[in-house]
Image (cartoon, rainbow, N blue to C red):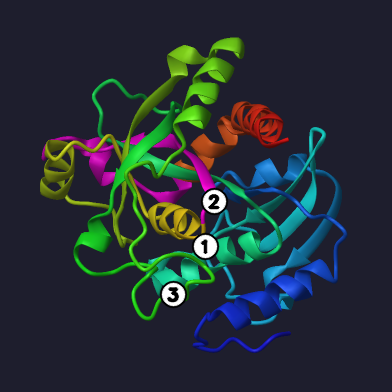
């Protein structure tokens, strides 16, 4: 078992991890997938798989959250080779954001040019309902605005530029393709588009905090994805991301539902929607694969 240390994830360390993985699989995927809370079953759809547990990968952290199995799965989704993270890392687990998003850089070094990130999120938009899929049009980086981000510290130009632009963090052509896929799947009424934010967690937000987040233009709130998307764009990967709305945020003090927000609810809703999400991702992988041939 590799030793878990507070290692600095330099280019050389990430390359060492990538080389380790490439020695253990013949897959050279162009598309990486991050499976959110309760959505790990997406990786179970892969065929002809090579599976590597996080604990067996040098310098890799270990996921400690229920619903995050903790392994990399290489294989085919449809006819396309992909690598899927069955479980991600979070700031609230005690990992800094550079470590949380390090696997994205490893994906880049094994040849991925595209990232699909999924998450479970609370809905702030009045038009959202539990079970909806929210395509991420953009994000507001709450943690980054307070000086906490994955690119803090010295920049290595082998990954990307010192000041990467984020005006088009989520690829507009992939968003267009996702809407067409939703229409073809007859789920367009359940697929929305919106702005997401990542908060530190692990506690859920207060009513006042949720009111503030809604006031500044946010449609959904979670505890992941933003730093992964930033890291992917820093190293010139195209990004598509969506949130599965697993609960509706409480905006009133006398709303008893807000008292009952819990991780078990997140897992339950994700499991109920896993087949739809898996088909949606499979179709997105096909669309992205066709666009990069």
Mark number for residue 65?
Answer: 1
Q: Residue at x 18, y 36 (%)?
A: 217
Query: Disc 3 versus disc 1: distance between alpha carbons?
Result: 13 Å
Could you tell me residue 225's position as x and y percent?
43, 52
Q: Choose between 287 and 100: the one closer to the eye.
A: 287
Q: Say which element carries label 2.
A: loop
How far apart are the alpha carbons under marks 1 and 2? 27 Å
- In this rendering, would 155 be left or right of 16? left
What segment carries the magenta color? 236-264
- Of tags 3 and 1, the one toward the viewer is 3
> Which is nearer the N-term, disc 2 or disc 3?
3
Foreground pick, 11 / 84: 11
Which residue is identified by label 2? 237
Question: Secondary structure under badge 1?
Answer: loop
Image quadrant where one finds the C terminus: top right
- In the picture, measured across the screen, residue 148 lies left or right of residue 74, that is left
């Amino acid at each position: 078992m590799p030793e878990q240390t507070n290692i600095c994830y330099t280019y050389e360390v990430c390359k060492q991890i990538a080389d380790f993985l490439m020695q253990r699989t013949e897959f050279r995927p162009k598309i990486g997938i991050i499976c959110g809370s309760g959505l790990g079953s997406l990786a179970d759809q892969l065929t002809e798989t090579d599976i590597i547990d996080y604990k067996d990968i040098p310098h890799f952290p270990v996921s400690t959250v229920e619903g995050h199995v903790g392994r990399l799965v290489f294989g085919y989704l449809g006819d396309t080779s992909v690598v899927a993270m069955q479980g991600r890392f979070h700031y609230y687990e005690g990992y800094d954001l550079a470590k949380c998003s390090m696997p994205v850089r490893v994906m880049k070094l094994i040849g991925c040019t595209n990232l699909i990130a999924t998450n479970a999120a609370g809905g702030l938009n009045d038009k959202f309902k539990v079970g909806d899929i929210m395509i991420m049009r953009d994000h507001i980086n709450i943690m980054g605005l307070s000086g906490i981000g994955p690119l803090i510290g010295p920049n290595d130009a082998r990954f990307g530029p010192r000041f990467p632009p984020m005006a088009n963090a989520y690829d507009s052509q992939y968003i267009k393709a996702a809407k067409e896929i939703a229409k073809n799947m007859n789920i367009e009424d359940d697929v929305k588009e919106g702005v997401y934010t990542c908060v530190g967690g692990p506690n859920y937000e207060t009513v006042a905090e949720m009111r503030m987040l809604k006031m500044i233009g946010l449609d959904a709130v979670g505890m992941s994805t933003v730093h992964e998307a930033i890291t992917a764009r820093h190293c010139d990967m195209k990004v598509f991301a969506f949130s599965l709305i697993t609960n509706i945020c409480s905006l009133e003090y006398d709303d008893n539902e807000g008292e009952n927000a819990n991780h078990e609810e997140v897992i339950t809703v994700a499991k109920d929607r896993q087949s739809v999400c898996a088909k949606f991702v499979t179709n997105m992988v096909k669309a992205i694969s066709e666009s990069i041939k």
